[in-house]
Amino acid sequence: MNTSHEESVEAAAAVLGELGVRGRESARYTPLTGGTYNTVLRVTLDRGRDWVLKLPPRSTAGLAYERGLLTGEITFYESAATVDSDGIVPRVVHSDTAATTGTGPYLIMTACPGTPWHEVAGSLEESEQAGLREELGRLVARLHTVTGPGFGYPAQPLGPLAPTWREAFTAMTGAVLDDAERYAARLPRSTAAIREVFAAASGVLDDVTRPALVHFDLWQGNRLLSGPPGAVRLSGLIDGERMFWGDPVADFVSLALFADIEQDKEFLTGYAGAGGDGVFDDSVRLRLALYRAYLYLIMLVEVEPRDAAPADREWAWSHVAPQLVSALEDVESGPRGGRR
């Protein structure tokens, strides 16, 4: 974040030098866009290897949960690898989150082939889209079978992993609301009022008793597709840095961003077929509303430490703020979402 390409290449060359790849001439560096936090470079080595290198920002400005994002990403990839027999998730090649080498924290992973889903969606036939959604459902269901050691973010930026999901999610929402106050973020309701909504519905979180692997950023830009027309396949699931151990229902938010996952029959067919629980009862719907509110809060608050451009701020206000209001209203009107 706020790092020039030249600085990024120098930092990348230093990392590779520690690993025995000497000289900038030994590798080609291509910046990868689309992310909003880390600096990301594709590294093509002379021997044909193709890696992706992530470097965290030097600035300490950011949201509280973002401390130690590389740890979360490494945890996601290593955990996902245990159930990803098709190699759709990147594999960790080298990493140093403690900056023990003097080059600073970094993560090197294998590069997944393909193009982000949203960039090619318009060229796909309806039947191809349906098949890909079902394939995605099967993969996500497998990811959700992985169980963590406790609830929360693995880097523990908000404190140790919690024994209950209610405790962890309360800390998560409390932290982003603290960030909203610290950065004076523009929200459609006061932080005090939003805290009350979360607190009133928190009892439903006790329905979650197993800390599952949750990606929480599965929008189309983090899903890669490859293959010729008529044989397009899911070839990459990337950017696992915002993962946490928690309720698998939380992944349904970004999987149907600004939409209704219950209407995605193909995804739910694949999800249920691979063992996922695709039943939407009152508890699931209320929890989903809570997670929608959490994600939309993050999207509205993060424009401040990102120093977002005016156009990006206006987009967030016009597109995300109404979604936050809708999610909060759904929490309030849910069977266990009213004031007690």
Image (spheres, rainbow, N blue to C red):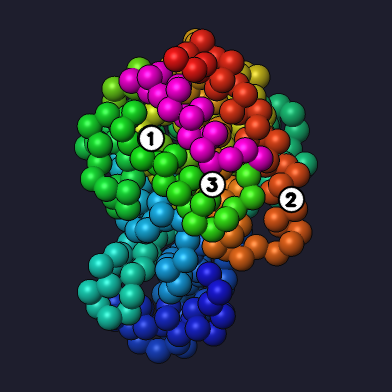
Image-based side of 68 in relation to 179, left or right: left
- 111 versus 242 height, above or below: below
Mark 3, secondary structure of its residue: helix
- Amino acid at pointer 2: Trp
Residue drawn at x 40%, y 89% is 23
Which mark identifies residue 227? none
N-term-proximal mark, 2 vs 1:
1
Which mark identifies residue 169? 1
Residue 36 visible (yes or no): no
Q: Nearer the viewer, residue 4 or 27?
A: 4
Query: What is the chief secondary structure element of the magenta stretch?
Result: helix
- In the image, the segment drawn in magenta is 188-206
Image-based side of 183 in relation to 162, left or right: right
Q: Residues within 10 Å of mark 2 (few under 14, many from 20)?
A: few
Residue 30 coordinates in the image, percent (x, y): 56, 73
Give the labeled residue for mark 3: 298
Give the labeled residue for mark 2: 315
Q: Nearer the viewer, residue 69 or 184?
A: 184
